[in-house]
Amino acid sequence: MEVASPQGWYNSKELVLDFYNQRRKQLLSVQPNKAHILLANLEQHFDVNIITQNVDDLHERAGSTNITHLHGELLKVRSTTHQNLIYPWKKDLHLGDLCNKGSQLRPHIVWFGEAVPMLDQAIEITQKADILVIIGTSMQVYPAASLVQYVQPGIPIYFIDPNPAITKNSLNNLTIIENKATNGVTQLVAILEANY
């Protein structure tokens, strides 16, 4: 709550900025993994829309083109008073860095207690899905975990996680791939190629 809430920002802007500056540096030092790349490659055969709770740009760097970031993006900042003023940002963010209307910039991250502005778009994507794939989530973070409730009846659902938090009894048409993302997405690709 110290670094991921409006109250934390109010209490110590410098602490919050330093936290995200460190995360940004970490992000710039890592690469997409095999799962990111396989998902991007699926675009050659399927209309793929990725809805992610992650704030990194690894899907983009892997080559995916349709990504909805539910919880914001680490490589962007936004105005504290005009939330639609969003800027790409790869360097450190400091007190005194202002938007073009003169307000302090903050990380473009959805903090605890804030609305999730991309939720309606995510719901619409989920409602139109022919297949839903859930990868590497505890299914405990809401409202993201509720998206599965918007899938149309009869749509196949694949859940990839080494410790699945949902069971076949909890959802219709559910296939659980009990594996980490890199191996699980490899299994998923084989299933999709064989069946669709």
Image (spheres, grey):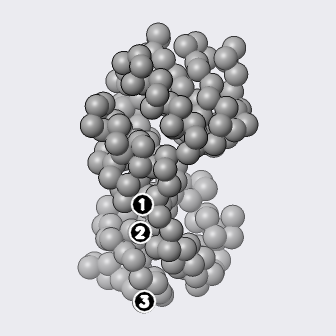
Is tag 2's residue or tag 1's residue first in the polypeptide sequence?
A: 1
What residue does disc 3 label?
96
How busy is the neighbourhood of tag 2: few (under 14 within 10 Å), some, or many (20 plus)?
many
Instruction: Point out the image quarter for the C terminus.
Output: top left
Q: Position of residue 46 (x, y in %)?
A: 30, 30
Determine whether label 3 and label 1 are within 8 Å by CB: no
Q: Position of residue 109 (x, y in %)?
A: 49, 62
Q: Which residue is mark 2?
A: 75
Residue at image location 38% in from the left, 55% down from the top: 62
* Residue type highlighted by circle 3: Gly
Mark 3 surroundings within 10 Å by alpha-carbon count, few (fewer than 14), some (14 through 19), many (20 or more): few
Return the disc, 2 or 3, that comes first in the chain's sequence. Answer: 2
Mark 2 vs mark 1, foreground winner is: 1
Q: Residue at x 34, y 24 (%)?
A: 128
Residue located beneath label 1 in the image:
57
Q: Is residue 178 left or right of residue 94?
A: right
The first of marks 3 and 1 along the sequence is 1
User: CA–CA distance between discs 3 and 1?
Assistant: 26 Å
Can residue 29 be seen by looking at this rendering? yes
